[in-house]
Amino acid sequence: MPAKPSSPPSEPVSRRGLVARLVAAAAAGAAVFNGEARAASPAVPRVAYHLSDMDKVGFVLGNIANHIEGMGGPDKVAIVLVVHGPALNAFRHASANPDLTRKLSKANAQGVGLEACGNTLEAQKLELADLLPGFVRVDQGGVTRLAQLQAEGYAYLRP
């Protein structure tokens, strides 16, 4: 019977090394828990949709739904919708139509990031509470946020 290869002698791990390993493992676990691992994965395309035209709201939400379906599901693509200008009015809770509300709710449930331009919110005297659920405020402004997303490797789409 052949001899088993010997394993290298194990060296004791210092406390400092152990703490560093634990911190790295905790950070990796937190990233996965927060969904950051999916968005950062090179295997998952990242896309930023730009919406400012009121007459394109339904069209863009339809594109996003088709995009997710075409990629094979919400876990196969990371999408952020950045809304500013007149289009933000379409998402007012008080006046949104039921079809738009349903489409936006579905997109939100599928993990689409919904971002509202802080400058537009101020100009239109709106608060996040005035919008349909799921939006976050982008204080640096919509166009600045879109440029930031592009710098982070997101594909830019403006239907």
Image (spheres, rainbow, N blue to C red):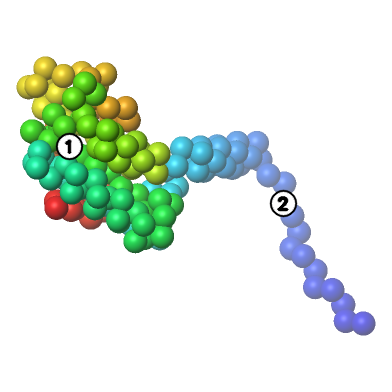
- Res 46 visible: no
* Residue 34 percent location from the top left of the image: 46, 37
- 54 with respect to 12 (left or right): left
Quarter-of-image position of residue 87: top left
Q: Residue furthest front?
A: 98
In this view, 128 is above or below 117 = above
Image point 80% across, 73% down: which residue? 5
Q: Residue furthest bottom?
A: 1
> Which residue has dot 2 on it?
11
- 145 with respect to 43 (left or right): left
In this view, 116 is above or below 73 = above
Three-letter residue code for mark 1: Val
Residue 83's disc is 1
* Residue 121 percent location from the top left of the image: 14, 23
Identify the secondary structure beneath mark 2: loop
Alpha carbon distance from label 1 to label 2: 55 Å
Quarter-of-image position of residue 125: top left
* Circle nearer the N terminus (1, 2): 2
Number of numbered labels in the structure image: 2
Question: Mark 1 or 2, which is nearer the eye?
Answer: 1
